[in-house]
Amino acid sequence: MKTLLKTVIPIAMLLGMNAGNLLFSQVSRKFDFGSGPVAAGYTAVRHQMLFSDDRGYGFLDTSGLRDVSRKDRNALSADFVTGSRPFYFSVKVPEGNYRLTLYLGDTQGQSSQTVRVENRRLMLEKLKSNTGEILKTSFLVHVRTPAIAGSSDLVKLKPREQSYFHWDNNLTIEFNGEQPNVGGLEISAADANVTTVFLAGNSTVVDQAEEPYAAWGQMIPAFFKPSRVVVANYAESGETLKAFKRENRLAKILAQMKKGDYLFIEFAHNDQKPGGNHLDPFTTYKQELKSYISEVRKKGGIPVLVTSMHRRNFDEQNRIINTLGDYPEAVRQVGKEDGVPVVDLNAMSKTLYEAWGPELSLKAFVHYPANTFPGQTQKLEDNTHFTPYGAYELARCVALGVCKQVPGLAKELKERFRSFDPSQPDPLDSWNWPLSPQISVIKPDGN
């Protein structure tokens, strides 16, 4: 058997942890999957173990799961759990940042797995092992609840958010792909010095909970090296600068922020609409952006502005029509005036969409003829929201902007995500995204 060590996993440090992580560090959890001998210090997980509050861990659905045993002296590689379809494993944990270590593979066969957490947040992308290989790989995950530290206030969740995986008291892991073989899982509090990259935005940024929708914020966690950066995506569909603040979402971020953390800010699609949340681009919109910047800097954080991507709207010459008015330019102006880095996703998305053209771009946005997607009887035509492929390509644009404008963070990106040309997007036929079980044809808030 050959063991591949993907990352070096440090011991969690207690100094400076929040109360939740300090508590959990004392009961760090280790799980050994399968029906064979259990590794010392690990908790056995059999394929039929459903999650319950009393147990505090388990699978959300055991259909199609089975235990597989192999002859091997190492208990973590001698057995595993696999499934005929994607499956979820959930563990009760307090709010905080965690390091997850997975043991994946089969000593007598191949494996291929895509791993996501919470609301389809991409962590491991089509990770393959050859026969006899057990992959030991780790990554960082942010877990949250609506409670705000040091306050009796809560984040004001929308009805649709009540069932989201990323607002409950559990850490939920989705195992997907051609042949996901899970032998072991370790969960421990992340090092207190880990940099948190917070995201504030709308439906074009959020961790979209259900297929076929996706956004760049749920793709970019997989772009960072697994040892130093954790992404905390607080974006939500339908949000504006004013609503995000009024619903205590900004307060939730600021309550957790420490010196050296980042806040990426992307709003415009809904701020331009008439109504109580409307902001004028060169006056109230700029004022709100400056207010966010000021609050982040008070916490020792680093604000980063992101201009909003275009909608899919082509003219007769196959050029993108600007439907966002002066809002992107207002963001650029604030960046110059306040000395804040600007990731110009608006400019890059124009190049990206025009490279696709009117036809291929349909694959990047949620466009499906009637009865061509599970549970969908009517056609879907959405020129604002993205498929996973479109979201991934936009995340690549954001990573490119980070490399150009945020050098302190750029060094934490994996090498292959440090270069990208929006005029030459990744081929669609090279894209692989196994569908999650969570599917809905209901359009996200915002347009």
Image: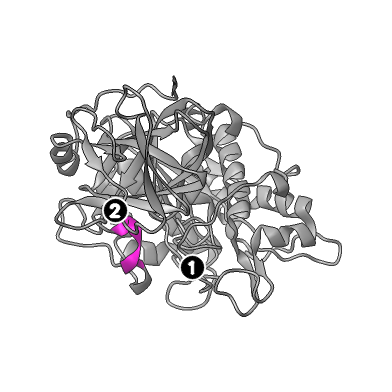
Q: Residues within 10 Å of mark 2 (few under 14, many from 20)?
A: some
The residues colored magenta run 161-167
Which quarter of the picture shows residue 402?
top right
Specify whether residue 340 is in view: no
Of 181 and 231, nearer the camera is: 181
Relative to 270, residue 257 above or below: above
Q: Please state if 345 lies on the left or on the right of 317 as rendered.
A: left
Of 36 and 231, nearer the camera is: 36
Of 212 and 292, nearer the camera is: 212
Looking at the image, do the residues carrying marks 2 and 1 touch, with CB atoms under 8 Å apart? Answer: no
Quarter in which the C terminus is drawn: bottom right
Q: Please state if 225 lies on the left or on the right of 37 as rendered.
A: right
Residue 178 drawn at (x, y percent):
54, 46
Describe the element under mark 1 as helix, strand or loop.
loop
Relative to 1, residue 360 above or below: below
Which quarter of the picture shows residue 329?
bottom right
Specify the amino acid type for callout 1: Leu
Describe the element under mark 2 as helix, strand or loop.
loop
Residue 141 drawn at (x, y percent):
35, 42
Specify the amino acid type for callout 2: Gln
Quarter in which the N terminus is drawn: top left
N-terminal label among 2 and 1: 2
Relative to 305, residue 104 above or below: above
- Cα distance in 3D space between marks 2 and 1: 53 Å
Residue 279 is labelled as 1
Question: Residue at 51% across / 68% down in the picture?
Answer: 270
Residue 47 drawn at (x, y percent):
32, 49
Residue 48 drawn at (x, y percent):
29, 53
Q: Please state if 431 lies on the left or on the right of 55 as rendered.
A: right
Q: Is the magenta region chiefly helix, strand or loop?
A: helix
Quick check: is 64 in the magenta stretch? no
Residue 48 is labelled as 2
